[in-house]
Amino acid sequence: MSRGPGLAAWLTLALTPGLGASTTRRLLKEFGLPENVLAAKRSALERFAPSEVLRGLDAADTQSAVERSLEWAESPGCHIVPLSDPVYPRLLYEIPDPPTLLFARGKMSLANRPALAIVGSRNATPQGAANAESFAKAFSGSGITVISGLALGIDAAAHRGGLTGEGSTVAVLGTGVDVPYPARNAALAEQIAERGLLLSEFSLGTQPIAHHFPRRNRLISGIARGVLVVEAAIASGSLITARAALEQGRDVFAVPGSIHSPLAKGCHALIKSGAKLVDCVEDVLSELGDWRHASTLELPPARSADEPGLLAQMGFDPVDLDALCARAGLPAEQVSAQLLRLELDGRVAALPGGRFQRLS
């Protein structure tokens, strides 16, 4: 989205301390566009957030952060992508808690290509790292984008393999997109920014904080069609990613290892729980056959609201979000995103009480 009042309003909501993504989504559901939220009376907003948090909307620190972000987005290859933007990763509309805003560096189109996440131990064995890189190279060569988290070990190997092919790679960060972590992977992060994509829901300058990484993991699986785990201990972030994938309805694959290796225990546990055992690329391609020709495929366009779709389902009478979701057979996050785009286009109006009306 280009610089302007719309993006500034999105950033104000995203960068206000204590507001949070879930509260922001509730505000957008109630009031419509971010500009409407900011124009609403504070007494109306206090139904959703405490007054001390709402004061942050107008705070100098928040507005300074908004301006810095807008300036950053003017640099080549830098993107700020709100939920309503057509380039927002469409698979994230399917997860329960999609970020309201994403920061990115690189080729944003990669976030909407067929993708497989490859994750695993930070303390990978040489063989495990070689396996991850080999799998990633093969998938990327087939046009499948490789998703991982820029960690040491398996993640880094997966990114290196992904960079060799057409599918390239996306690194989802638990820090600001301008803060590569760990520092040992800074050079790799720059390569990904040039030939792939760095992606984060965290604001610029965000430093590594432990509880950010489980949140990062749900996005790794969220923008992929499946997750391949290569070497993982029982208590590991990779299993958090696998659990998120299962909750999101994604496929989970695991590479087996020696029964004596602690780094095989997590993969074996996944296989016992129903994950697909993988020992060659073909195991994944045979399970998900439509990926075989992914180099020539794009995800189908987001369901257009002027096709027999959302506008047709609305009619011309006011309707609330729940009723519209039921009519369209789509999740609330996806309907909300389409409604925001339609508002931006002047084809739908947000009414008081969380209702929407189609305009002629």
Image (spheres, rainbow, N blue to C red):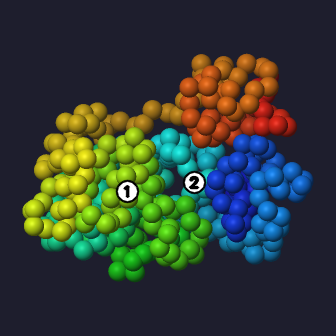
Q: Is residue 57 visible?
A: no
| Position above or below: 187 against 163 | below
Q: Residues within 10 Å of mark 2 (few under 14, many from 20)?
A: many
Residue closest to the eye, 2 or 340: 340
Where in the figure is residue 135, as x and y percent of width and height? 20, 54
Residue receiving disc 1: 241
Q: Nearer the viewer, residue 215 or 136?
A: 215
Q: Residue at point 24% right, 33% down?
A: 289
Regarding mark 1 in the picture, which secondary structure is present there? helix
Label 1, residues with CA under 10 Å away: few <14, some 14-19, many ≥20: many
**Horizontal relation, residue 150 to residue 321: left or right:** left
Q: Position of residue 19 (x, y in %)?
A: 70, 62
Number of numbered callouts drawn? 2
Split into 4 quadrants, where in the image is the C terminus? top right
Q: Residue reaching furthest bottom?
A: 183
Residue at 38% across, 48% down: 245
Above or below residue 241? Residue 88 is above
For image coordinates 21% across by 71% down, the residue present is 124
Residue drawn at 24 percent across, 60 percent down: 266
Residue 80 is at least partly visible in this image: yes
Name the spot of residue 167 as percent of width and height, x first: 32, 50
Instruction: Find residue 99 and name its label.
Output: 2
Which is nearer the eye, 259 or 337?
A: 259
**Which mark identifies residue 223?**
none
Front-most of 70 and 233?
A: 233
Per the image, label 2 sits on a secondary structure element best described as: loop
Q: Is residue 206 above or below residue 33?
A: below
The amino acid at mark 1 is Thr
Q: Nearer the viewer, mark 1 or mark 2?
A: 1
* Residue 99, image quadrant: bottom right
Q: Disc 2 residue type?
A: Pro
